[in-house]
Amino acid sequence: VLVQHEGQRDILLKKHIKSQILKNLFVLQEVPQITNNPNEEFVYVGSLNKRKGFNTFFEIVKKASKFSFKIIGQPTDRTSLKHYHELKLFSNVVLLGRLNHSNTINQIANSKALISTSPMEGFPNIFIEAWACGVPVISLYVDPGDVIKNEKLGGICSGSTDKLLFEMNEYRNRAEFAIRAKAYVENNHVLNSNKIKEIDCIFSDVQYSKN
C-alpha cells in the first residue's frame, strides 16, 4: 500500500497493514517568480461545495470584513451556489471562477495565505503549490502528517473558526516564510535524482517481497 504521509501510515499500522510513503510530486518549474510586493488577499481554491467546507468558509468571510478574499472555483451544490451569489455583494471578495492551472498558481503566488476549510483530505496538492510559491496554508481541519505544525508551514486550527481568524490576523514575515516553505517542497516533493532512487527502492522492495 502506498500512502501520502506518516499519519496515513500510522493508521494502517494499527490495522496491521504495512505501507510505504510516496509523497506527492511537484514540478518546481511551474512556480512563478516570487516578488517582495506585499499582498493582503487570502485565497480559497477548489470545488465549492459542502464536502470541501465551502459553507464554513462562507461563514468565516461574514465574520472577517477587515480581510480581503479571492475565490477560485465554481459551486457544485445548491447551498454553495446560493452562498456564491451572496458573496458577489461583498466588497472584500473577488470571485475568479474556474481558472486553468497556470493562472491558479499565479493567483496563489500573489496571495497572503491559502485558506482551507475542507474537513477531510489526503495530502492536497494545492498545499504544496502554495508552499512552493512561498505562501502559507491556514487550515481549519487538515494537517497531513502534521507537516504544517512540524515544518511551520502555516496555521492549523483544529476545527476552530476563531483560531483560523486569529491565524489570519497574526501571519507576518512572508520573506522568511517563503525561504523555509520552498526549501520544504524542494526537499520533499520535487522529482529529482534522490526522489527517483526512493521510488525505485519502493518498487524493488515490492518485487523482492513478491519473490
Image (cartoon, helix red, strand yellow):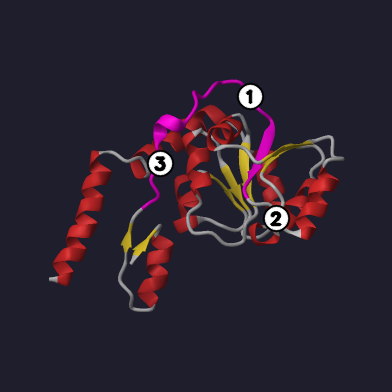
Tag 3 residue: 26
Nearer to the camera, 50 or 21: 50
Label 1 residue SS: loop
Tag 1 residue: 38
* Picture quadrant where residue 96 is located: top right
Q: Amino acid at mark 2?
A: Thr
Q: Quadrant of the N terminus?
A: bottom left
Q: Amino acid at mark 1?
A: Pro
Task: Find the magenta span and give its range.
Answer: 23-46
Q: CA distance from mark 1 to mark 2?
A: 33 Å
Q: Is residue 35 magenta?
A: yes
| Residue at image coords 41%, 30% | 29
Q: Position of residue 22 (x, y in %)?
A: 34, 55
| Above or below 83: residue 43 | above
Q: Is residue 179 magenta?
A: no
Q: Badge 1: how crowded within 10 Å, few (<14), some, or many (20+)?
A: few
Label 2 residue SS: loop
**Of the two numbered discs 2 and 3 in the rendering, the one whose residue sits closer to the viewer:** 2
Label 3 residue SS: loop
Give the left or right position of residue 167, taking residue 4 as reference. Answer: right
Q: Position of residue 26 (x, y in %)?
A: 40, 41
Q: CA distance from mark 1 to mark 3?
A: 25 Å
Mark 1 and mark 3 lie on one chain; the one further toward the N terminus is 3
| Residue at image coords 22%, 58% | 203
